[in-house]
Every structure is written in structure tokens, then in C-alpha cells.
Amino acid sequence: MRLSTLIISCFTSVAVNAQSGSDSLRMDSVMHNLPEVYVRGERPVARVGGSKITYDLPRLIEKRGIDNAYDAVKQLPGVVEMDDRLSLGGMGETTIILDGRVNTMTAEEMMSLLKRIPASRIEKAEVMYNAPAKMQVRGAVINVLLKQKTDDDSPLQGEAYLKWAQSHQAGFGERANLLYNRGKFSLDFMYQHSHGDDFSRTDEFSHHRLDDGSVHDIVTEETNRSNGYSHDYRIGADWLFSEKHRLGIVYNGEYGSKKVNQSMSGNVLGSMNIRHKTWLHNLAIDYQTAFGLKTGAEMTYYDNPEEQFLNSKLPTGALNYHVNNEQRVNRLKFFISQEHALKDNLNINYGAIYTSSTNNSRQEYRSLTSTTGHSPTSSYTRQSEDVVNVYAGFGMNCGKKLMLDASLAAEYYHSRNWNRWNIYPTLNITYLPRQGHVLQLGVSNNRYYPNYWAMTNFVTYSNGGYNEITGNPGLRPMKDYRLQLVYVLHSKYQFLAWLKHSDDHFTQSPYQRHDRLTVSYQHLNSDFQQQIGTQAVVPFKAGNRLDARLTLVGVWQRDKASRFHDLSFDRNIFFGMAGINSTVTLSAKPDITVSIDGMIRSKAIQTTYDLPASGNLDIGARWQFMNKRAILSLYCNDIFETSKINPRIDFMGQNLKMNFSCYREFGLSFTYRFGGYKEKKHEAVDKTRF
């Protein structure tokens, strides 16, 4: 289990005024324009409407050395980064979408896509702590709206980008974006090439007790050296027949290859070679009308073959094999939705979504020699799912101080393991007690399904075969219930409080088996996980030079499992985080700024894990020149090499320690824009559970 740096975001001073009328923002038709409440202050950076808070994200990042949408989204108030994923405070799973359209990508693929999108594309961002059903997604949502029009009449515009990043090894990236726009037709193209080497080391100490009374101290060092490349490309076309009447077609493709060489020393001696490739093809079409109707379809093909060679010597014997693993997924999605704007500041919305997916996974051993007393076997699984979701909702303004947004979704889920109906109610209440104050209450529930590979009966190996990653065909979905309260005080300070209860909570955790000398990693359901948390975002300035944000987070967490293999646990802890995010303007002409970000976090828990305290300090500089067409950025992340969390387990006879390598990273990037480039929107591809 690895948790990466928490990066604290910023919040700009705001004030509140009530206003009715239709929203002037360009949005997807599934998001009807409620009368809004504008949030204004020193600079108009945000406004509140219904269940969303809209931020002028370009203003939040204008003085920072940020060159991609991923780093830009991290600057939103309350957004934190953990394990290379972004979330709103302690809200856990947060979905990021583009232009109001639910993307069809895994969280990892969405993060990768955001890192490829230039920050200059972003027009604004909408934050929803509790998304209504019309968004076609549940829970916390960040909707990134991309610019659609250029500042001049240039028919062809673009951007070129180069990056070098050096930690233990060097990585490189080249990106090109083009947009052609003529009349009612537009065509956009994106290509990125990423390549380079990587290096990591994991030291593990295991004090392992067996049923026969013997005790084994297993000390290992696993070194990973890898190199690879990826090609990401996208082409899209839009026909705008009239305002809000549009036909869009997008193809998204991905091809990548990676080679990993592992060597093990200590009580386990050996080597493993891994070769894997990735293919992704996605085609999406959507059509929307001026009277609120929208329909669309999407087709996805994903293939991830992998070949492994392992030769190792363990205290219990030798394990040598050649195995082919593969996951191939086909997915179809169709949807239709309708919205009606009625009088008296009322709108209603309803729709239906159908999703069908088939996952074919195989594990085929070409050769196998084992003297450890345990031999893996070849296996094949086919998993099919069909999901039908129908929903209805409404939004209304009750005067100038109160806004309601409610919806109800009914979802039928069918697969070999589950066949059931689920009901998902959502309620958001926004209240404006007086100017400069916003109070927003949200209530919702959700259900999370495990990824496909976690539900197979496959076994894969690491650490020379001492560690086994085992699937769990009996894994149950997780049921999540949430209550959150957001408060903006005196137009400047943001406070968030939440209560979350998750039944059948699942996560992957290690377990030292008693019957044989093996550490098993497997997703298991616990009874529940509970959280009570608070977050405060406090901005402050010092003249025209310093602009900073302080974020404080406090969380009480309880994890309970009546059955975790042959153990049980009921653990709780209070942990806290504090971070600062600051920008210093060194010079206006030339345009040079420096950013300094830091974070510290106290120790925490996860199932039987104890997670020690961690922190990081990052610094970066940005120089903008050539009439703002060229940007040169230099950075150094994790200066003191303290961001990695090295988990420990010392619980009811389980004794395991892990240390992950940690290296500071230096980086240099150059961006050049030509033709007044403002890039088009890009669709994403759902690989949520691949």
C-alpha cells in the first residue's frame, strides 16, 4: 500500500450576492441552468448555483508554474492528493469529468489524461460535494470546463510542450495539440509521447509465525528497474447547427509498452522479468438539442497482455515459472436525458442510462516448477455486467436565500455474482444567511463495486514469490452513506464537515499465513469504516508579493472487521494534516513567480496497517515571456525525500515492516503557444474497474 503526497489547494477571497436569471456558462445539456448566486470579492473567482460552486480556475493558477490540468485542479479549495488520486477533502472517491460529461476512464487513466491537457485549456471548474442524479455519477464531482472559442479568428492554433523530469532516473514527455475551427465545424487533435526509465526499491522485514511453532525472520530487498513508452492520441469533431444544438464524435486511443526487471536479495534470491502492453480504443458520439434533449453512445475496447518470468529461491524451496496474464474488456454505453425549464425558478430533469460490459481475463502457465509445497494453476474467467439506471430530479430557488436540488435514481445491476435493484436519493440545500456567507448541506448514498481483477481467482506473485496477490470472487460491493456541510465565512474562509459510514468496506491488505511461509495480499470486506472529519481553508496575503493558503484537516476514523482471515479488529484513530500553498511574485516585468508548497500529516491507520507520519516540501519557479506565448518552468519536488509512507503491522501476531524508496525530483518544462491556441474538449474512456 502506497500513499503519496497530499497537496493542499488554495482558496481566493469571495463575497456573495443573490441573482436570478439563466446561467451564462456553456454547459452540457444534462446540467440545466438554475438561477445562480454570484460569489464576488476582490476578484470574481467563484459563484454558487444549486449544488455546485463554480471557480474561475485560471485566476487561481495564473501566477503559478502549472502547465497541465491535473496540477491546476489541485489548486481548487479543499482538493487533496493521495496515492496519485485527487479528492475533495476527506470525501474519498471523487469523480473528475470534462464539460459535464461523465468520462469512461479509471481514476488512474483520468489522472493521466489531466496531466496531458494543457492548463491553458481550462475555462473554469465546478465543484459538487454531492452530485445530483442528472450528472450520471454519484458522490463528490469536479467538473472541468474547457475553453471552446479562440480569442481571435485564427483557423489553426496549437501548443507544443517539452518536459524533462529527473528523480533516480530520467523521464521525458513531448506533447502537441492542434485545433481547426471554421464556421460551425471544428476539428481537434492531441498527441503525447511519454518515455523514460524508472527505479525503485522496497525493503521488507517479516517476523513470520507458523502453526508448527516455528518462527521465521524474512528480510528481503526488491529492486525494480523499468523502462517504457506510451503513445496517447485523440481526434474529435463537432458540428454546431445552432446554439445548444450539436453533434460530436470523438476517437481516443492509447498504446503503451513497459519492461520491468526485478531482482530479489536477502532470504529470497531471484529475479523476475515482466513485459506488458496496453491497447485502448474508444469511440463516442453524442447529440444534443436546443430543447434540452441529449442522447449518446460509447464503445470501448481495452486489452492488457502481460508476460512474466520468475526464477527464485525461497526458504521453503524454489519457484520458477513462465506465465501469460491478460485482461480484455469490451464495453457499451447508451444514454438519453431531458430537462425542462419551468416558471417560478423551477426545472425538472429525467433520463436513463444503460451500460453493458464483458471482461475476459486469463492466467496461463506455460511452464512451472515449484518445490515450495504450493503450485499455482492456469485459470480463465469471463464476467458480464448489465446496468440500467433511471432517474428523475428537480431544482428550484425559494426566494433569494434558499436553493433546493433533489433527485432519485433507481438502478438495476445484473451479473453472475449480483442481481439486484438499488435506490439512490440525493438532496442538496444551499442557504445564504447574509451577504458573504454560504451554507450548503448534502445527503446521499452510493455503492462501489470492486474492479474486475480483484474478483478473479487468480494468483500473482511479487518479492520472489514470498508475496501472493490473490483474487476474491466472493467480494461484495461497498455501501456508502454521507452527510456533509460546507460553509463559506466572511467571503474568504471555507469550512467543511462530513460524516461517512461505509458498510462492507473493502481494501487490499497483507496477511501472514499460518499454514505456509507466504504473505497474502487480498481484497476483503470488513464490517464497516466510519469517518468524522473537518477541513478549514484559510487564505492570506502580504501586499502584492505573497498569496498563500493554509489548509487544516482533522479526521476521526474507525475500522471494524469481525472476520479478517482468522483475526478480527476494531481500531480507531484521530489524525490530522496541515499544508500551505503559496506564490511569491519576484518580478512583474519580466514575469517571474516562485511557488512554495508544504504538507505534514500525523500517523494514521488502514485495516491492520499503522501508517507513520509523513510530509513534503516542493518549490517551483515560472518565467513567462514572448508576450505570454512561452513559459519556462523549473521545479524540485519532495526536497527532503519524506513523502513516502512506510507502513507497519504489529497486530495480534502479525509483524511486517516495509520501506519504500523515496527520491526528490527535479523537472524542467517549456511550453510554446501559437495562433492564439485555445484547445477543444476531449472525451475520456471508462476503465474504472479494469
Image: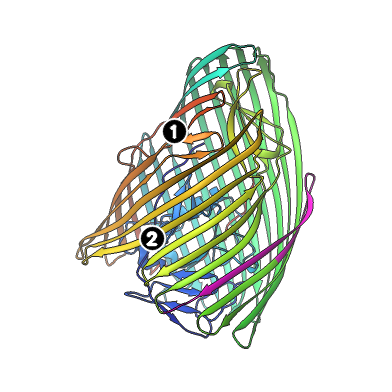
Residue at the spot 62% in from the left edge and 56% down from the top edge = 481
- Residue 655 location, x and y as percent? 52, 24
State the SS at label 2: strand
As for residue 406 lying within the magenta part, the answer is no
> Left or right: 183 with respect to 489?
right
Pointer 1 residue = 646
The residue carrying mark 2 is: 537
Magenta residues, start to end: 409-434
What residue lies at 59% left-to-right and 75% top-to-bottom?
404
Marks 2 and 1 sit apart, C-alpha to C-alpha, by: 28 Å
- Counting from the top left corner in percent of width and height, residue 525 is at 66, 40
Of labels 2 and 1, earlier in sequence is 2
- Report whether residue 646 is seen: yes
In the picture provided, is 373 more to the left or to the right than 263?
A: right
Q: Nearer the viewer, residue 163 or 443?
A: 443
Residue appearing at x 47%, y 34% in the figure: 227
> Which amino acid is tagged 1?
Asn
Instruction: Assess disc 2: are there few (<14), some (14-19) or many (≥20) residues with their C-alpha within 10 Å of its C-alpha.
Output: many
Please say whether residue 338 is visible from this viewpoint: no
Q: Of the residues tagged 2 and 1, which is closer to the observer?
A: 2
